[in-house]
Amino acid sequence: MKISVVSKKLWCVHKQLVLLLTPLVFLPLLFTLPEKEGKCLYVVVLMAVFWCTEALPLAVTAMLPVCLFPTLGVLPSKKVCPQYFLETNFLFLSGLVMASSIEEWGLHRRIALKVLTIVGVKPAWLILGMMLTSSFLSMWLSNTATTAMMLPIASAILESLFGDLETLKQKCKSTEEGKDDIMNGQSTVKLHSLPSVPSEKQILSIDRMDGIEQTDMRTSEEIRIESEYQMKVWKGFLICIPYAASIGGTATLTGTAPNLILIGQLKSYFPDCDLINFGSWFAFAFPLMLLFLFLGWIWIAFLYGGLNTRLCYKKNNHRAEAEARARALIEEDYRKLGPLNFAEGAISFFFVLFAVLLFTRDPKFVPGWSVFFKKGYVSDAVTGVIIVSILFFFPSQKPSLSWWFDPQASNSPYVPLLSWKKAQDSVPWNIILLLGGGFAMAKGCEESGLASWIGGHLQPLAEVPPAAAAVLITAFVACFTEFASNTATIIIFLPVIAELAIRVTINPLYFMIPATVGCSYAFMLPVSTPPNSIAFASGHLMVKDMVKTGFFMNILGILSVSLAMNTWGVAMFNLNTYPQWAQPMNKSAVITNVLFPSVQSFNATL
């Protein structure tokens, strides 16, 4: 049998082979390491391999601690199972339910179209508008839902600007074939012309025919240059949306799962650490998001032609007409939505209330409203659940007292803003289990002593300057997450990073925050994140487009995080001192200080 045939058959069963061989390959860990640490590491390695290869569904892999930790004697089930629904999971669940109500009444589409009407239709500004809208929506909706909603809007605008994409591709192909004919000494160039009767998709106004006639009058070289340029802009539009969604998700705790894993593991490892909540995280991460979004916009607009002065500033009747059509399309879509109805207004009110209450519960710099309750009893999860519970009984139509006295009035059933069926269908329960699996793994690492054991083997890293170590950690995590789920990535590495910080007596947040943010910066491959996959599935992007754009985006992201941590991050979280809340975990602090005295200078120079 040929090697190619064998390899194809092996690939067909590669997941089953991973499931069978991985436990056998790593079996020596159970016998060569200290008993409890070895067993815990065995489970962690199995989960890491299964997550990275997706040999099992991610959620199923996340449930392995429930069966493996108790049977191997790492942790009793009564300690493992509660990790799957901590208060952090309730905060995440409340954010998802709020997002489903926004999607139910189309408020996200109204926001998107309104922003696009404000920024205008010049390519550079339109790319900026797409990125701003996508990032804002992904702060509250899932990154995947944001990308799925924004891409059709972008495609409609692009078609009004440049016409049908297939026609545009045909122009590029035809003109290239024409050039080859001339080089081969064949007949004169036959310019590609559009059909004499344009399709309905191509006609947005009667002026479209004038534009077509002007296009036919141009030379082959002009058509080629313009078509290639328009294809570049088209790619820029498609690629900016998933990138902006990934960036925007980092700005709020509920925006993406890794942020919540950070909170959960902080509470597990450092119970006395109360520096990070919804408000303080937003105050740190939102400026970082804006900075990275601006730098990303400059890079994408430059790379794909959006900043080209030909299209942005030069007067041209053909382009002016295309821009007018695009503006008309956006305005028409927004007009079709009609005025803000009662349900949209109610959702807007509860959405704003949801955000304000989370921001003001305990903002740190001033007393929050939580001081009116018993200290430590009210958390962000309580706030979220209260608000989303209201959605299930608040009416979606304006109540009327006259309805009770009007026998002719319609006796239609009472419809709340959100039904449980809609919420149940919208919430990705697999992510809830994935979060729980991460917390269970962290608990196992803590209780078994595995985190301390790994930290003891990271002593050589103590000689690296802390600022450089933070950059290296961010870069490593950002690269690793290109090939694995960002949630799985942070679950695997955060306990190790926390232990490393303790070993070198650096504020753990100085390493843990950059790693958490960095694992959301997956831009280089279609498989890195679901938003990237959705954009790639459109069929208009190539892998090399994402690699070329995403590589520099990763660099910009790492530099942005480093700048944020060493400027306003230091002031907000007091990162230049080793905190009291980390002292109980550092039982060997004196020994560490003796072994690594050079690290102490960081506290004076950060």
Image (cartoon, rainbow, N blue to C red):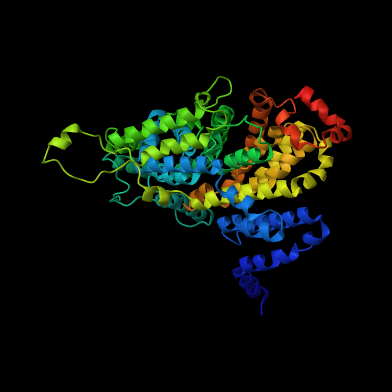
State the image coordinates of residue 103 (x, y, percent, origin top left): 38, 42
**Which part of the image, by quadrant, shows the N terminus?**
bottom right
Q: Percent from the top left, x then y, of residue 100? A: 41, 44
Q: Quadrant of residue 556?
A: top right
Left or right position of 454 against 6: right
Report the residue at 84% width, 41% height from top: 460
Q: Is residue 572 above or below residue 492?
A: above
Return the residue found at the far left: 408
Given the current orientation, which residue lies at the most extreme bottom position? 1
- Is residue 226 positioned above or below 563 on the image? below
Quadrant showing the C terminus = top right
Q: Is residue 15 above or below residue 111?
A: below
**Residue placed at 11% from the left, 40% from the top?**
407
Q: Residue at x 48, y 39 (%)?
A: 138
The one of 101 and 135 positioned closer to us in this rendering = 101
Residue 308 in the image: state x and y as whole percent. 51, 33
Q: Residue furthest right?
A: 594
The answer to which of 144 and 20 lies nearer the viewer is: 20
User: 554 left or right of 399?
Assistant: right
* Residue depicted at x 44% and y 47%: 148
Taking the view exactly as shown, the residue that stands out farthest to the top is 366
Front in this rendered view, residue 344 or 247: 344
Would residue 604 be visible to someone looking at this image?
A: yes
Which x, y percent locates residue 149? Answer: 42, 44
Give the total of numbered labels: 0
The quarter of the displayed image where residue 580 is located: top right
Q: Is residue 109 visible?
A: no
